[in-house]
Amino acid sequence: MTQTPDDPTNVHGVVDRAQDAIGAMVGMASASTLGAHDAEACVANASASDLYEIEAGRIALQRTGSPQVRSFAQMLIEDHSRSAEILAAKVKLAGLEAVAEPRLDERRKGMLDDLQAASDDAFDEVFLTQQTAAHQEALTLHRGYAEKGENEVLRGMASGAAPPLEQHLQMAKHLRSLS
């Protein structure tokens, strides 16, 4: 018998969805508070976000059966790789090289673990739900820093990052509506 993600007997799926939902709330709170003002917090969050997006995209390329999700995943890998390069250059220009080492935080590692653990039937739903939350968080971070950030170079970078993030968010929502 195959368990669906909404099946109450699928304890792992329920727990993974709950962890992702709580993680999304924590991420939004972090992005809209400290990350919206502090250069080091913004850089750490933005670099972890790009790294998560690249890794999630790679997992999706391996796991999805949907051509639309595959195309979206490839776009995420390409756009967030470019974003990570821009961030690294701007961090250097801003004199903040010490905080530029991209690392996944435990929350995003957990999201990737949940994505890997998703059943084949639930994979696209889990991926697109995570992408919606991750892009809402990243958009909040970049818009907030563009408005209130302490470093002029990073404010410009954050402002430029918002349009592609908005496009990704809209695409994730659209693909979710199709499934």
Image (cartoon, helix red, strand yellow):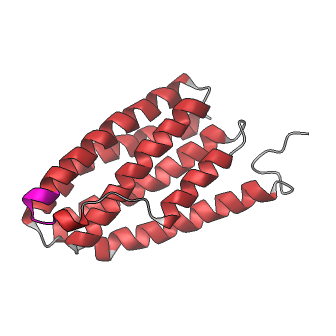
Residue range (magenta): 91-96
| Residue in front for this viewpoint, 100 or 63 | 100
From the viewer's perspective, is residue 173 above or below residue 147? Answer: above
- Whether residue 163 is visible, yes or no, is no
Q: Is residue 47 left or right of residue 154?
A: right
Among the 4 quarters of the image, the one containing residue 85: top left
Quick one: quadrant of the N terminus?
A: top right
Residue 94 part of the magenta segment: yes
Q: Is residue 115 left or right of residue 103?
A: right
Please give the name of the residue rendered at 66% of the width and 58% of the height, measured from the top-left corner. Answer: 17
Height in image: 108 above or below 59? below
Residue at image position (62%, 35%) is 179
Whether residue 16 sits left or right of residue 87 in the image: it is right
Question: Does residue 151 sit above or below 73 in this rendering?
Answer: below
**Residue 35 coordinates in the image, percent (x, y):** 29, 71
Find residue 66 and report its horizontal and vertical position in percent: 58, 26
Reply yes or no: does residue 64 show up in magenta.
no
- Which of 38/129 is in front? 38
In the rendered structure, the answer to whether residue 67 lies left or right of residue 39 reads right
**Figure quadrant of residue 2:** top right
